[in-house]
Amino acid sequence: MKYKRILLKISGEILQGQKSFGIENEAVTRIVKELVDLHTKGLELGIVIGGGNFFRGATYAIEGMRRPEADAIGMLATVQNTIVLHEKLREYHVLSEIFTAETIASIGTCFSSENAQAALRAGKVGLYAGGTGNPYFTTDTAAVLRALEIEADILFKGTKVDGVYDRDPVEFPDAILFNNISYADYIELSLKVMDLTAISLAKNNHLKIKIFNIKELGNISKAVFEDNFGSIIE
């Protein structure tokens, strides 16, 4: 197997499915079935999920709420999504462990690199909630941070587009897809599919990132096992 341990970042909106808000059971089930398949193949999985299906702190901060408080709500939204994944994995008889950025004793264990890696070695899926635990940092940055802390071989980001484009492909149908792009070129072009703080942290620590479309059944496995699926940032 090309990778032994990966970190998968999932956008919270993916769990909405066809809904405009919240969680759709079919969407969660589809994602979890793919995670179970990878887990049974022996891949060690760490997961960071966003909270945009409930609350996006950076957006609500401009409507009168202070950014730190808005981001705190967003971090709690990621905890809700993580609990959903934890319970759905349990339905499929896959053990997982929730690690939170701040202590929430009734939900999970406060994250530490040592304990998170021990859980992966024990065959559990690692679920990392609460972002970085700090305001002003996105769950993209949290994903890079956790990937480095668990010593993942690569970070996968599942999103709504096929990879890294030179422009927003939704607005610009002629946007160009990059199969490979360097960290430096990504930063210079100020691309948006992953925030620049996350990319800079990955660059400084030589963490490879693959961006791919997670909306179709089977795409997580394709991203993991097929070299030409999605876009690589390295």
Image (cartoon, helix red, strand yellow):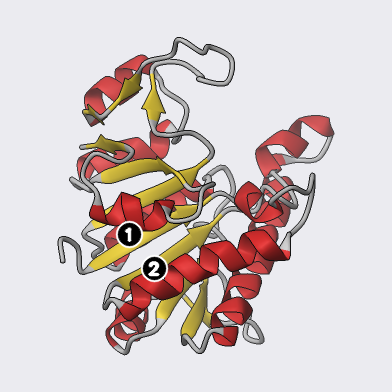
Badge 1 marks a residue whose secondary structure is: helix
Disc 1 marks a residue whose amino acid type is: Ala
Name above or below for residue 19 compared with residue 153: above
Quarter of image, res 39: bottom left
- Alpha-carbon neighbours of circle 2 within 10 Å: few (<14), some, or many (≥20)? many
Q: Which residue is mark 1?
A: 147
Q: Residue 157: x, y in percent? A: 41, 47
Q: Residue at x 37, y 55 (%)?
A: 145
Q: Residue at x 79, y 44 (%)?
A: 20
Q: CA gap, disc 1 to disc 2?
A: 8 Å
Q: Which mark is residue 46?
A: 2
Disc 2 marks a residue whose amino acid type is: Gly
Number of disc labels:
2
Q: Specify which label sits upstream in the sequence, 1 or 2.
A: 2
Q: Are marks 1 and 2 in contact (CB under 8 Å)?
A: yes
Given this view, does label 1 or label 2 mark the residue nearer the observer?
2
Quarter of the N terminus within the rendering: bottom left
- Can residue 124 be seen from the camera position used here? yes
Q: Residue at x 77, y 38 (%)?
A: 60
- Alpha-carbon neighbours of circle 1 within 10 Å: few (<14), some, or many (≥20)? many
Quarter of image, res 178: top left
Badge 2 marks a residue whose secondary structure is: strand
